[in-house]
Image: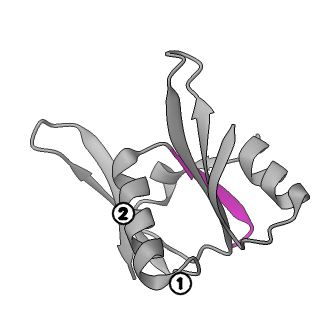
Amino acid sequence: MNILRQYPESMSDRDAYRLTKAVSVNKMQSAVGSVITPQKWVEFEDTDTRTGDLQKVLVIEADNELFATVSRTFIEAFDEMVDYFGADVGEIKVIGGKSKAGREFITCEIA
């Protein structure tokens, strides 16, 4: 596991461990249609247990709940917000949709 970015930057080891190793984490898909305010988040690379490939994982703590995703679409949108607004992005809306190919996806936008 390799941590790529996190907020706050001075996150304690305990919080980093909790966000990257939590068992009681919700899929980001469960937050579709909701507005969440990330208090803490960590983006890291981890090995996909099925393929052995590295994948990006984003875990966000909002309202004392953890939400995780490996959705490339969601992570890219979140990264753009962080690059534009800074690590404390404020409220974000979790959006679900269906691609032209019929696959479901999730993404996010500033609320």
Q: Is residue 65 above or below residue 50?
A: below
Q: Which residue is mark 1?
A: 90
In the image: residue 25, left or right of residue 30: right
Secondary structure under badge 1?
A: loop
Q: Where, quadrant-wise, is the N terminus in this rendering? A: top right
How many residues crowd around disc 2 within 10 Å: few (fewer than 14), some, or many (20 or more)? Answer: some
- Residue sitting at x 49%, y 16%: 51
Q: Which quarter of the figure has residue 110?
A: bottom left
Q: Is residue 79 visible?
A: yes
Spatial CA distance of label 2 from label 1 is 14 Å
Q: Position of residue 93 (x, y in %)?
A: 41, 72
Q: Position of residue 13 (x, y in %)?
A: 88, 57
Secondary structure under badge 2?
A: helix
Q: Position of residue 71 (x, y in %)?
A: 41, 45
Q: Where, quadrant-wise, is the C terminus in this rendering? A: bottom left
Q: Is residue 94 above or below residue 8?
A: above
Q: How is the image coloured?
A: one colour
Task: Give the magenta range.
Answer: 63-69
In the image: residue 29, left or right of residue 21: left
Q: Which residue is mark 2?
A: 77
The residue most toward the left is: 100
Count of marks placed on residues = 2
* In the foreground, 22 or 3: 3
Residue 9 within the magenta-colored segment of the rendering: no
Dot placed on the residue nearer the N-terminal end, 2 or 1: 2
* In the foreground, 42 or 29: 42
